[in-house]
Every structure is written in C-alpha cells, then in structure tokens.
Amino acid sequence: MKVVYNWLKDFVDVTATPQELASRLALSGTNIGGVENGAHGAVIEAEVSSNRPDCLGHLGIAREVAAIYRLSLKHVAPKPAEGAAKASDAIRVEIQSPELCGRFTARVIRNVKIQPSPKWLRDRLEASGVASISNVVDISNFVMLELGHALHTFDYDKVRDHKIVVRRAKHGEHMRTLDGIERQFDSDICLISDGDGSHAIGIGGIMGGAETEISFSTKNVLIECAWFEPVAIRRAARFLKLHTEASTRFGRGADPEMAELASRRAAELILQLAGGELLAGVVDIYPGKRAPQKIRVTRSEILRVMGADVPDKEIEASLGALGFAPVRVDQNRGAEGSLLAAWESTPPSWRAEVEREIDLIEEIARIYGLDKFPPRLPPARQGAARLPHYEAETRLRECLIGLGYREILTIPHVREERDALFRPAGITPAHLSNPLSEEASVLRSTGAVTMAAALEWNLNHGQRNARFFEIGRHYRLHGSNPVETRVLTIGATGAAREKGLYDTACDFSFADLKGDLDTIGALAARFTWSDGGPSWLHAGRSGNIGAIADDPISRTSFGVAGQLARRIADKLKLRQDVFLAELELDPVYAAMQAAKEARRYEPVPRFPAVERDFSLLLADGTKFSDVTETIQSLGIGEIHGIEATDLFRGKNVPAGKYSLLVRVILQSREATLTDAQISDFSGRIRAALETHLGAQLRAS
Amino acid sequence: MPTSDPGLDKTLSALGLTQASEVAARFAELRAHFDAQLLEVHDEAGWKRFRDTWLGRKSGVLTQITGNWLKPAAPESKPAVGAALNALRAHVESQVEERRAAIECGAEESALARERTDLSLPGVIRPVGSHHLIRQVFQAIEDIFFSIGFSVVEGPEIETPYYNFEALNIPEFHPVRDDMDTFYLDLPKGAPGPLLLRTHTSPMQIRTMERQKPPVRVIVPGKVYRRDNPDATHSFIFHQVEGLAVDTDITFCDFTGTIEYFVKQFFGPQVTTRFRPSYFPFTEPSVEFDVSCPFCGGTGTAAGGGTCSKCKGAAWIELFGAGMVDPAVYGFVNYDAKKVSGFAFGVGIDRLAMLKYGIDDIQVFFQNDVRFLGQFP
Ligand SMILES: [Zn+2]
C-alpha cells in the first residue's frame, strides 16, 4: 500500500518527516518497504500484514500515526445534500446468501456528468500508482485508498428492473468481468445479479461485470458498498485466480460499519465532481451486523506474557488511540500501577481480528515500544540433548572428510526417468502433484540419483576429479504412507591421486571405494561384503554391504557399492568411470553404537611378530576369504593377521589359475616364537592350503 | 694424521728424562702437538681418527703414557708424572668433545647450505574433504543453542496439512498460505489425506509439544520447500532452524534475550538487535527481527564510502521472524495456555550463510561444484 504523506495530513496533523514517520511506523508494526520522493511529495511503501486490513487505507495508517505520536484523529463525516426522491424507490436489494454477504448498501445519483477527474484527484491517484479513468471510477478508487473500503459503481440504467439480488453462483455459471475475461464460477462464489436474479452483473467483493460498467455515456450511477465474508472471498479469489484490490480488502476482513460511510463519502465526491442529484437515504441490507464484544486485559497477564510492566497511562492511551475504548474495571480503580488492574475494551468494527486478551497485549506492547522490554537470558531448567545419532554422524562425517570426501547437498526433486534408472524394483516413488517442471517432478527414491547428477555437473564443468558424500534422505511411498530414510551416499570419479612432484597419477578404482568404505566400517566394527548389488551398478564390480554387529538389522545388507553401470554412464554421457555407494544410516549408526560399547582395551603385544609369506597358485574362483578361512580353521592362536600382498595372472601362471602372495603374521602373547614353532605353524598352514584349496605352493 | 710422538713406547728413564722440569717440558710439547693436530680436524671421520689417536683404549697416546711413562716411573717422580698426565687428559678430553660438537654443527650447516629444501615447492598433499557450508552454519547455530539448553530434534519433510498449517493456527484459505506456495504429493486413490512438503520447520513445534510436556526447549534443523521459481535469491528448497521454548515462566524478555544472545554469538558482540512488531498466525506478539548490519557496523556506509551493499544503506538487516507462541497453538497440543508461555523462531540458514560469506546466488549451494565446495574447508 502506497501511503501518500500529504494525504495522511487530511486526517492527522503529523509533523515528523516522512523518513522519521516511516521508521516509527516500522517499529510499531507497519512493515516499511521504503520511502520515495515523487512529484506529489513523499510516498511511503507500507507492506501491510494480512491481519491488518484496516491499514489498507490512509485513514487506518493515520490512526496508527495518531496512536504513535499521541495526536488526535480527524473525523470523517460526509454530509452530501440529498434530493427529495427516495433511493428506496429507485433500487431494491435482496441478499439471498447472508453467509457470503453480510451487508449491502446502495445509493443512487441521477444525472451525473462523467468526465475526466480534476487535477487534485488525478495527482492523488497517480501518487498511489492508480491510473485515472473518469471522475466516478476514480472516486471509487479514491475512497478505497482513503478509507480502506472497496466499493463498486454500476451504470444504474443497465441494472435490469433496478433490482439487485446477492446470491451464490450456480455451478458452471459464467460472466464476463470488467477486464473482459469470461469467468466461470462454482457455487461457493457470491454473485451480484440483477432483475429476477438469474443474470450476474458482478462477482461480490472481487470484480464487477463488463455489462454494467460506468462509461462516458452513463447518466445515472448506482453505488454499491458492501461487506463480504473474508474466507469465502479468499477461496473465491484463489478459485478464480483473480486477486484484486477489492478481494485483498474483503479477503482480509473489511469493516462492515465502514460500508455505509464509504458509500456516503463517494456520493459526496460524485456530487462535487460529477454533479447530479443524490436520492434520499440509503438502501441498507445488513444481516451480518455484529454485536460488539468486550475483552478484558489485566496487568498480571501483561506481566506473565511480556515479562515487564507497562504503566497504566500507556495502556489506556495506546488502546484508546486505536479505538478500543479501554475502561478500568477492577476494584482497585484509581490505584495507579495496581497489580490487580484490569481493563475492559471493545474492539472497534475495523479490528475484527482482535478477539482475545493476547491480541490486546500485542497492541499495547507495539505502541508502547518493544525496546522497552529488557532482554534477559532465561536459565535452563534441564540438560540439552543432541540428536540420538549426533555422535555417530559426526564421527562418520569426520572420517569421510579425512578420507578426502567433500560433503554435498542436493535437491531431492528429480526427473522421473532419471529416478527410474536408480530405483530398486518394487519401489513406489513420491511424485509431486504440482511440480514446477518435469525436471523436478519426483522426490529421489535413492541418494545415488542426485549424487550421480552432482558428479555429472562437475564433469560437465571441467572438474574431472571429485570425491563426494551426502548425508540426506531418500523418499518412498509404502502404499500412501511416505517413508523418509536417512542415507549416506558416496560418489567418486577421476584421480584417486593426481600426478605430482613425488607421485604418479592413479585413477580412483573399486578398490579405493572398498577401502574407504572399510575404513568407515571400522567405526562399526567391520563391514561385510557379499556378491550382488543393484542393476545400476556394474555387475562385476559391485557388492552388498552389511555389518558384523549382533543387531540383526545391522547384520543384513544395508548398503550397496560399486562402479556405475556402463549402460547408465553412457546414458548420462559420463566419459570416465564413476563409483557410487549408498548406505542406510540407521543400521550403520546402530552398528557404530554397538561397536563402541563392545570395544575394550587389548594389551599391546610385548613379543616380536614374525611374517611368513606363502606364494599360492590358486584356481580361479577360489577367494581370498577361502584362504583366510582355511588358515584360521587351524585354530592357531598365534596367527595375528593374514594379508594379501600380491596378486597376478598371466605370464608364468597357467590359464584358469592365479597367483596370490599371502603374508601371515605370527605373534605370541606369551613368548618370542622359536624357529621350531614357526616352522611347525608354516608347515600346517601349507598343508591346509594344499589339502583344502588344492593350492600349489611355490617357494617364496 | 701424524701418529704419535716418538718416544711414547719407551720409559722416561730410557728417554733420559729424569728431571721434573724435563718431564714437564715433554708434556708441554705433547700438548702443543695435540693442539696443532686439533686444528686439522674438520670432519667426522678425521675426528674419529684423532680421538682414537689420543684417547684410544688400546694404543692411544694417553694409554701409552700411562703404560710406558707413569707405571714404570720411579716412585719419587710418580706423583709429578701422574699430575701432568691428568692435566693433559683433562685438556685432551675436553677439546676432543668440544671439537665433536663443533663438527656436528658445522657439518649440518654445510649440508644445509648444499642441500637446502626448496620451501617454495609444495609438500605431498593428502587431500582432505570438507563440510558443506550450510552444514557448517547449521552446526554453529546448533552449538550456540545447545550451549543454552536447547535440545536438537528432527522431523519429517513430508508432512500433513494439519502439522504444516492447521495446528499452527493457519486454517485453509488463510492469507498466509498465499505466501507459502506448497508442493503436494501425488497419492494413490484412497489415501487418508493430502501430504505436502513442509514449507517451514514449524510443524516440529507441534510434534514436539505433542510428545512432551513443558519445559520444552528445542531447535529443529532441516530442509523446507516452497514452490517458488528458482533464481539468485529463491530456491524451492532451503534450510531452516526452528526454535521453541515453552515453560511456566517464559516471557517476551526471555525471548528477546535468547535471540540477542544467539546473534551476538553468531555475528560478534558488536552487533545490536532490533525487534519490529509483525504478524504470524502461530505467534503473538510476533516480531521481525533485525541486526545492525555487521558489514558496515550499522552505519549503512561501506568501508570505502558509498552505500553498504549488504544492508543497502539501511544499517539494519532483517534476519527472521519470531514471537511468543500464540495461545491458539497450545490448544492443538493440550497445553494450558493460561499456565504456560513460550517463544518460537525460524532462522533461514541459506540467507544467513549468503550474508555472512558474501554469496550472491543461492543456487551455488546445490550445484556442488568442487570449486565452490573447496572454498570452505
Ligand atoms: Zn551495511
């Protein structure tokens, strides 16, 4: 709402500069967008909040100014000269839907001269950013901006039978509005119709119809000034996608008492600027008249909510200036500052949203000044708690960052086709019913889908090395229940190590991914790997991840890792290998927690370790885990570790076989191992490998 | 190095040195000889030979003197020979040790000069990762509120209209809903009711109060969604931290004090705060909360003159909305509005991060370009 500084002076003798005034308004609750100096003086851009429809006119803002500066507000009491003929003989009004229209007033002015507006009126409208059309139309805009109440003028002669019927629309009924658009209604919309009521001439509280519009040939004018039910107006405006100055004002709750006054003010101005004869009286159908409610406000409640006191005088002055007519009602009347003090107030008709004591306290506080309530830090009554998984998540995040992964945040809205590439079979994704675009029409059902996109974005922007992780959620539907699951997603591509002064380059490989995951896995005791993986991963370079925890949820597979399938990499035009992993976090956190609780000190061995290497020729298909299990099955307590230190195929290795160098670390907690013990262990290990795995052992 | 002085393998009497003065002169000669040799010792290998020559256990000069001069000496001259030998030994030992130290330092210095590492060359960098900037700001805010007794809770991003709107005193067709354009989920037929992506973290106010009785002190970090077309200052996803404190004695003063504490912790003690009355359906009194612009010191003028670009000359920056919990909200969670009071606030994290780090495009948070991520290790 553009507040024209000079216009305010019609109602209040303000002396503060526009800048000063704007900042005082801001501190008392009228948000200010800025102050501009234009051809017609200063204009303050007031961003009026939706609970204050009374401030959508200069009178309302002036009332605020009067309250802030303790100035008196001038009364608006138009007294247009009336002719002998009665309005009630010229126009009949019937409200068939009082639940939508609580008041309807009609005045008629005959023999007006429609012509351009005088300069002062055009200036006011121009300062307010409203185009001037003709005197009568301009007057209705002027009165709306002045008093905050929207009204409508009809060409009286085009209103059939000179009868107005206010009613619900029939379903599917339509009408052409002032802006020339044919609009269709539903039965919750309030229409102004004429004659027998079958024919609509306006949408109540939103926009008039084209047929009865004022034109330069209009002779006689019908002024409609009404009150419409706010919720119905908001619903209708949204239904029609038609938001107007009128719908804003009625939609937020206009002042029903203002309807007659605004009509009178318009009549006064029309007589002044367009001449004519005002018919006597007003046709005023007012089924929605409200009885004023009394609200009590007490000092004890002010203290309880605000934490500091407000003097009696300030309470009475601020409520009084805003029209609440406070009356002290407690038994200690006359005792200033009494803790028992109570006031009864009657909210004025323009403040229908004030219904409770707290509403009055807010009024008092904002006019008194929020800065008068001294800030203090309240002591805590109880300990604070982090999220249950805070520690686990922090450890995980630190570990990943230490391993060189950067945390990313992605937007979960993705294209359906993209999501489908990564979506496990049988999963129902969460589609949006009103997406902004097809690109963002479904919530990701895996973390991998947006991780792949983040890597893609970097590759497309010349950044070929990336190691990312994201701790976020994926979203799925189980029937119609949404399920949000915390997931860790990892993505890596490009160099694991770049060529430098001291190093050669080395591309990120599946082994890097597995190693990094196993490093994380150490926080959860250990991750276990099993063959398999989703279809979006390379069939030969992927696996399922679980943990060795006792907790059965953690033990089952909760994650996948591997190289992105070529088929998908090609589709995304990724020209280098991309590695992805996704783990559900709740089981990981549970395993981390269990591992943490199970961890106990183990004394550092005091006796030296001995390494023995075994060069094995194994049949393809024999796994390293077969080797370790075979060795461990011997039950030699001195076996401290089993490592694979070299693996090769090809040259000097027969087809169908591979060569594996295995290092066994032997160590006793009791004594230094003797040569005899060591050769005994070695012999048993060799024999077991030969017997159980058919391994050929080479001298090493 | 010249080996020892001739005559060490003979006794003193065999050398014809019987007079005490003659013996003393002989020792003086040896000492001079030692001092001359010492000057020739420049490196570790030379020093080792030199040490062995003089102090070697089997055939060092001092051992020879002990064996050949002192032991066979006549009883009357023994004390003098012994004293002279001890004096010489003390001199030799101290000088040898001194020389060793000198050589060690010198060797290091000369080696440094020859092989000094080029410090302008990089070391071996083991690349570490980074926290996302939004995560860093979340953490900073969580830590500040945790330190004054706020617990951290999380909630669903997919919400019901009840939690996102109704229970927060925002009935259908409330004007505020127009400012919160909302994404809805496409649900199968027969779904119990519509679902939406929460437009703020405030639903967790309700969920928290449903779960626990006062005192309540929580913050809720999380993602929120509004159906705005993306541009430099709008994203249809952004991040918020909700705060809620409810107790039997929480007042507006406690509220402003808490917010002020947070702001001074976050922006620094020089920042001042301002509360402007505002309107939200779920708080009353409601406020918009401003801080004195931390970038121009609340003057509106940039350091080099001209208008401050951060506050656009206003000297204040609008940070977020907040207020005392509206009593109507307590009605939805079975709290007695006559007995409890509290405050709530919602901080936009992206905006805070943009302000603090001078970021002019909200989209960079979600593009995840490594060149952006690397700027905030
Ligand atoms: Zn500034």
Image (cartoon, coloured by chain):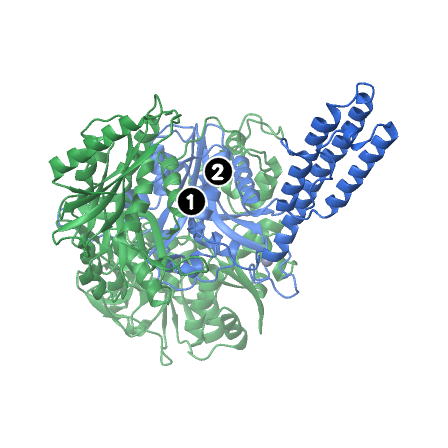
Q: Nearer the viewer, residue A622 or A276?
A: A622
Mark 2 = which residue? B145
Using the image, name the chain to which the residue with label 1 belongs: B
Q: Nearer the viewer, residue B355 or A680?
A: A680
Which quadrant is home to the C terminus of chain A?
Answer: top left
Mark 1 = which residue? B241
Residue at 44% in and 80% down: A115
> What amino acid type should be assigned to the residue bearing mark 2?
Phe
Using the image, name the chain to which the residue with label 2 belongs: B
Q: Nearer the viewer, residue A131 or A642?
A: A642
Percent position of residue B261, x then y = 55, 40
Question: Ligand 1: which quarter?
Answer: bottom right
Viewed as shown, does residue A156 lie left or right of A62? left
Q: Is residue A91 visible?
A: yes
**Around disc 2, counting alpha carbons within 10 Å, would you say few (fewer than 14), some (14 to 19), or many (20 or more)?**
many
Spot the green chain and give its letter: A
Asked whether mark 2 lies closer than 8 Å to ligand 1, one says no
Q: Of label 1 and label 2, which has the lower sequence position? A: 2
Q: Nearer the viewer, residue A685 or B85?
A: B85
Spot the blue chain and give its letter: B
Instruction: Determine which quarter of the picture holds residue A276.
Output: bottom left
Q: How many marks?
A: 2
Q: What is the distance, in whole Å, between disc 1 and disc 2 at their CAs?
A: 10 Å
Looking at this view, name the residue that lies furthest to the top.
Answer: B75
Vertical relation: A495 (above or below) A293: below
Instruction: Determine which quarter of the picture holds residue A675.
Output: top left
Answer whether labels 1 and 2 touch (C-beta < 8 Å).
Answer: yes
Residue at 64% in and 57% down: B299
Q: Is residue B165 visible?
A: no
Residue at 36% in and 49% down: B223
Vertical relation: B144 (above or below) A49: above
Percent position of residue B373, x then y = 43, 56
